[in-house]
Amino acid sequence: MALSTPLAPASPSVRVPAPPLTVPSDAAIALAVRWLRRRGGVAALAVIDSRGHLHGYHERLRFASAGVVKAMLLVQYLRSHAAVPPNVRVQLRRMIVLSDNGATDHLFASVGARGLARLAQASGMQAFNAAADWALSQVTAADQARFFANMDRLIPARWRGFTRLLLSRFGPYRGWGIPQVAVRFGWHPFFKDGWMPTKRGQSLLQMVRLERRGVTFSVAVFTDGQPTLEYGVTTIRDVACSC
């Protein structure tokens, strides 16, 4: 996703500062879309650029959420509980950093499908559909890219540091794909990913908020029908590095 693009032109002869570049550029997004069109299976891309504008490819196509809904569970739990005991903080960490489904089940029992629906409404999601099985909730790349772009305003101030810490941590089963590329170019990624087998093959989903020197943008890449997990990781990773 043109992660190595400079943030502003360097020209000592210009006295008036040039307007900041939009990150990522339209050209970089077009290259990412061309890459996804060449891959097998089904893919969707949504980008909220540094000016807050949405760009996409099949961005309103619905996918089963798999583990990406855990970011919503984290935020909604913190929004709906005035106090978070230490043992629950451990569960929240296990859910996000270790992708612990047992911890997720416990937290989902507290938040529920209704809690997720309330968060979807508060964040302006247009196509989210909560399910009794959290992994089968229906999500779109557009909604999740917006959610990550606007996440700070959705999280109670006292929990923003905690949330950002969890979502920036790499773990045994998370951080593949775009975050791995982003850190090589000095970006600070906040992310959630997930995968699950489907009738089509493997479904891999990832959404990332990227920050660097005052510039922020978010990207969500969702896939289904990937022949192997490795193929799906390459599909998502090269949205960033193919540019």
Image (cartoon, rainbow, N blue to C red):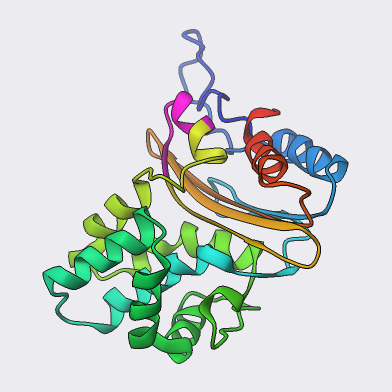
- From the viewer's perspective, tell me whether residue 16 is left or right of residue 31: left
- Label count reads 0
> Horizontal and vertical percent for residue 19?
53, 33
Q: Is residue 185 visible?
A: no
> Horizontal and vertical percent for residue 225?
79, 57
Q: Quadrant of residue 63?
A: bottom right
> Horizontal and vertical percent for residue 202?
71, 56
Q: Residue at x 63, y 37 (%)?
A: 237
- From the viewer's perspective, tell me whether residue 198 is left or right of residue 109: right
Q: Residue at x 56, y 64 (%)?
A: 144
> Horizontal and vertical percent for residue 69?
50, 69
Judge by depth and name the residue closer to the eye, 4 or 169.
169
Q: Which residues are magenta?
A: 181-189
Judge by depth and name the residue closer to the eye, 115 or 54.
115
User: In the rendered structure, does residue 159 fall within the stretch colored magenta?
Assistant: no
Looking at the picture, does residue 99 appear above or below residue 13?
Answer: below
Looking at the picture, does residue 14 appear above or below residue 78?
Answer: above
Q: Quadrant of residue 241?
A: top right
Q: Residue at x 48, y 57 (%)?
A: 149
**Which quadrant does the C terminus fall into?**
top right
Judge by depth and name the residue closer to the eye, 95 or 242.
95
**Which quadrant does the N terminus fall into?**
top right
Q: Is residue 87 visible?
A: yes
Q: Residue at x 68, y 34 (%)?
A: 238
